[in-house]
Structures are given as C-alpha cells and as structure tokens.
Image (cartoon, grey):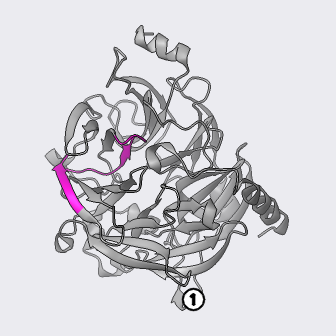
Amino acid sequence: MNTRHLLVLATLVAGALTAVAADADETCNSPYLSRLIKGQEDVVHVWTLGVEGLGDGSDKLVTVDVNPASPRYGKVIHSVSVGGRGEAHHMGFTDDRRYLWAGGLDDSKIYVFDVGKDPAHPKLVRTIADLTAKSGYVGPHTFYALPGRVVIGALSNSKDHGGVSGLAVYNNKGEFVAKYDLPTTTIGGVKGDGYGYDIAINPAKNVLLTSSFAGWNNYMRPLGEVVKDPEAMKHFGGTLVRWNLKSFQPEQILSVPGSPLELRWALAPGQNWAITATALTSKLWLVRQDAAGHWQAREVANIGDPAKIPLPVDISITADAKGLWVNTFMDGTTHYFDLSDPEHPKETYQLHTGSQVNMLSQSWDGKRLYITSSLLSRWDKGGADNQQFLKAYRWDGHALTPAFEIDFTKERLGRPHHMKFSALPGAQVAALAAGG
C-alpha cells in the first residue's frame, strides 16, 4: 500500500465528512453523490448481460423512459453495446454524477459511460482493463463514489479465483490509486474470510462497511452444481468488516453467517444503523452500536421460510428508514418489511412478481419501484422460468400496482440486472415529450 495514496485518500474523505448530507436517490447510492433526484426520475439505465444469439449478443447499457408524461413512457429509448460478454453485473455513478461505471464479473473490465451530457443517450467513453494487473483482484462488483474517486469492491482474485479479494480505488479519470485487501486475520476475536461484496458508507460515524459473497469459482459455475457440491458450499462469505473511513483500515470483523449481501444504511437523521440480508440463511441482520458504543451485528428477522432457501438478493431501504423492500430470487417474491422498530422488523406485504426476481430500485419519494429478473448468467433459471424483464410498479403504501413491463428476451436485449436513475435537463424533457 502506498502511504502517499493513503494520505491523499484520507484527506479527501475527511474533508468531505462534514460537507455531505447522507442523502441519495434510490436510497442506496453513495452519500457523496451530487444532483440528487428527489422528484420524478426520467430514465432508468439497465446494465444488461448479453446472451449468445440474442440481438448482438453483447453486454449493454439499456436506457428506458420512465417519465409518465412522456409519449415513450415504459419504452426502450437507447442502448449501448460494449462489444462482448463479460458477465455484466453492477454499476455506480462518480460523485459528480457525470459518469456511470459498470463492471463485468467474468472479464473484470470496467466500462465508463457518459450520462451527464445527454442522460437519455449515454455514450461509452472509456474502458478500464487494468484492475487485475494493478490489484490482483477479479470481478469488480460494487462501484461507490468518494470525492473525486471511485472505490470498487471485487469478488475474487487472480491467484486461485477464490473469494479472497479487496477494495480498489481509482480516480474519476480512470487511473488506479490504491488497493486494500479484505482482512483474513483475526480482529476483535473474529477471523476474517477476506471475501467481498457490497460497500456502504456512513460519513457521520466515519464507518465503511463491506459484506461478503463468493469467488469466481462459484459465481461462474451453474447454481445447481454449486449447491450440490459440499466443498463449493464452504466457500461463501460469512462476515462484515467495519473499516475506518478516513484511513481505510479494517477495525472490526463481525460474524454474519450465510453470506450477507447488500448493505443499506438508515438515511433518516440520527438513525446510524445499517441492515443486510443473508442469502443462504434468509435472515435480516441489524448493524448498530450498543449502549457502550461498540458495533454489533445481530439477526432480527426471517425472510420467508429459511428452510426453503428463498435466496434473498437485493434490498432497498426507504428514505425515512421505516420500510425495507426485499426480493427473493428462488420464489420470485417481493417483500415489504416495516422497520419502524429496526430491532424487530415485521413483514407486512408481499407479492409474487415473477418466476425469478433479483434487483430492485425505489424512488426517493417511495412511490415507484423497479424490478429486474437476472441474477447471474449461470444462476438464472431455465425453460419457461427464465423470465427476463424490467417491471415498474406504483406503491401507495398498501399495495403494488403494475405500471409497465419490458420483456428483454422479446426485445432481444439480454438479461437485465442492475439499475440506476437519471433526470433530464428541461430541454431534453421537452424533446422527449415531443417524441424526439
């Protein structure tokens, strides 16, 4: 680790700690993101896995018009292919929201799209192909904005393609800055597994959290084979790591068995707790400080019937931190939990939304919810259950009602995975309304 890089990063982060409010549209973005969308989003960008023989077969960024006032509401208005299939998965904005970084879990390439000049028509402006050479990491998963930087959580490594990995930091120009290995030592009485997945930052508490999943050997293998292989099932993460945000040093390892995936901080002022869901054990876990100020993680609720392994995947917390959406992949169900008492979440609503469901994004005002279907190319279901869609719903606080649906297979686009919102400048909104 380069000391100069560490000091520069610490200075940038520390300088922003008091200047940034912990707000973000979609309720899952970095708190350092600018130009927040708290009203109506105009387009949704969908990072989509290519399918051989379907369209051009390439991974692509698909843009959908989602403004109800537009004549093209619920329609695909643009797509940008990257010229190959690398297991498209997650993406994230730079802090100025001008660029959207998207990664491939198989080829470890990072694609940078300009979404600032014309959000309705993103352009691929840069491909970063040195992640593995610079860091030794494979499978860029989470892209999280820092001031002038992007921190990338990886899932695997080039040595054995297992789950031991780390965090790579690039500047907004796409230049490598530093790497930070996830701990495999014992900290606070808990041994680290070194596995990575999601990233979530709470500037007020000077805390960065990381969660854990599995390496390339598991996620690029058919799910049916993995679950039948006792050795493979041993290679899933079971920890969260609490890092000092200013120094980027791990300070605590929390035991969270069952592969904790997405991390969400409560966004309401003063609610300095986070929540995650474990994929293999179907549990909600709460992360917060106890009365003595020590950080703890504990199981607080079941998601569906854990014995049936519903496989919770994505979660989305409401802006007021009083509700949580959870998608379970295997049974195709979208769940809503009342988080008024985060120590005792209660499921109050559920809806079967597809044969398989994965990612979900909600608007800041909580009135709209978007769902995609694909998990991983070799984990998605087959036959008639291999539904590939983007669905939009309206939420009135009591029930979801369908707004629109796009069949990505019928449109020959591929397998839709991650989503991000954009708002258009006034002139562009007018142009879209006119059918331009």
Q: Is residue 408 above or below residue 138?
A: above
Left or right of residue 40: residue 294: right
Q: Which image quadrant for residue 367? A: top left
Query: Where is residue 343, by image quadrant?
Result: bottom left
Residue 177 x %, y % = 75, 57
Q: Residue at x 33, y 55 (%)?
A: 323
Instruction: Name above or below for residue 307 compared with residue 117.
Output: below
Question: Which residue is painted at 27% across and 36% down in the image?
Answer: 394
Q: Is residue 63 above or below residue 335?
A: above
Question: Is residue 263 magenta-colored?
Answer: no
Asked if residue 103 shows in the view, the reply is: yes
Query: Where residue 248 appears, x then y in whole percent?
Result: 69, 69
Q: Residue type at mark 1: give it.
A: Gly
Quadrant location, the C terminus? top left
Horizontal relation, residue 126 to residue 50: left or right: right
Please say whether residue 328 is visible from this viewpoint.
no
> Which residue ends up furthest to the top in the rendered image?
434
Q: Nearer the viewer, residue 177 or 32?
A: 32
Q: Which residue is rendered at x = 58% and y = 51% of the image?
A: 31
Q: Which residue is mark 1?
A: 188
Q: Nearer the viewer, residue 325 or 155?
A: 325
Q: Is residue 386 above or below residue 236?
A: above
- Name the spot of residue 336 as percent of width and height, x first: 26, 55
Q: Which residues are magenta?
A: 347-366
Instruction: Tell me the residue at 49%/61% (across/down).
Output: 198
Coordinates of residue 386 in the picture (x, y in percent): 21, 46
